[in-house]
Image (tube, rainbow, N blue to C red):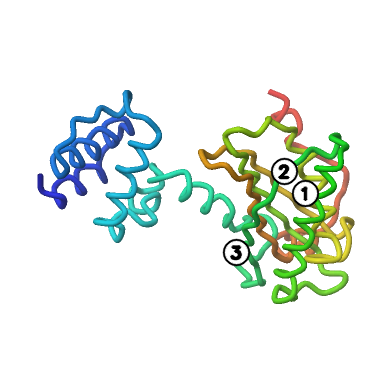
Amino acid sequence: MDWNFIYQKILMEKNISKVRDELVCYYNSENGTNYIFENMTIDEKLDVKRYLMKNHGRDLTMFYFKTGNKWYFSLSEKYSLLSQIHCPYCGHGSTGSPNCTIPIKGRLFSSQYKSKRRNEAIEALKKEMDVLSAWINYMSKGDKICLLLVFSLAKQSKDKDIDNMAKIILDVLKKRLFNDDIDIHHMNCFKVFNETDSDKVHIHISKSEINENKDTIFPFDDGIYKYVSMLDH
């Protein structure tokens, strides 16, 4: 099968199931297999993904943008892009304020879970952040923070409350990436799941300008909220 024909076809496709079928069909034609996506094991799907990336990685890298923000090629791409979202509210996307994305591995626990293993995991995360924060030092005391956390839980991990995971990570980051929790003016969190054996958290940190009101013509609050009734419906 001709890859260029398949590639142009999947770029235009509007049904993600058909995209999968086209890619698996292409793999079958090149490798003499007879896979059907719905019946494939995780290992077989990984084989297909690795083959496609090895032979056509240039076309498939940043696939989300190449398909007009429709399809991610893999969860790795999806989670990576999630962790690099430029906040539309805090200003760094338009003003050029510094921002940084940091992936760290470590067992993720809820703040409600008390045990020796939990404390050991937190200390391991702190040590990893101590190493990383040595070269990530652009946040000054008093800087207002925009923080994005993407928690990626391993397949065998027990599901956890996102707010309790966030509390632990904030404790890990304090005095390392920023001075104090009170400096965080905006925070977004995602909880996603991966097929590996490792928990991960992607941290995107930048300076927040949300309270500088550079985008507001009349930067004061008169207590009149004309759109509240609209939000209630």
Q: Earlier in the sequence, mark 1 or mark 3?
A: 3
Between the C-alphas of marks 1 and 2, the distance is 8 Å
User: Residue 13 occupies which quadrant of the picture?
Assistant: top left
Q: Could you tell me the amino acid type at mark 3?
A: Gly
Q: Could you tell me the amino acid type at mark 2?
A: Leu
Q: Nearer the viewer, residue 114 or 62?
A: 114
For label 1, the SS is helix
Residue 71, x across and y down, in percent: 38, 42
For label 2, the SS is loop
Q: Residues within 10 Å of mark 2 (few under 14, many from 20)?
A: many
State which mark lies toward you, 2 or 3: 2
For label 3, the SS is helix
Residue 148, x across and y down, in percent: 68, 52
Q: Residues within 10 Å of mark 1 (few under 14, many from 20)?
A: some
Q: Are marks 1 and 2 in contact (CB under 8 Å)?
A: yes
38 relative to 219 in the view: left or right? left
Task: Name the residue tied to disc 3.
Answer: 93
In this rendering, the answer to whether 69 lies above or below 45 is: below
Q: Residues within 10 Å of mark 3 (few under 14, many from 20)?
A: some
Residue 140, x across and y down, in percent: 82, 74
Q: Nearer the viewer, residue 128 or 218?
A: 128
State which mark lies toward you, 1 or 2: 1
State which mark lies toward you, 1 or 3: 1
Q: Earlier in the sequence, mark 1 or mark 2?
A: 2
Q: Are marks 2 and 3 in contact (CB under 8 Å)?
A: no
Task: Name the residue tied to disc 1.
Answer: 121
Task: Name the residue tied to disc 2.
Answer: 108
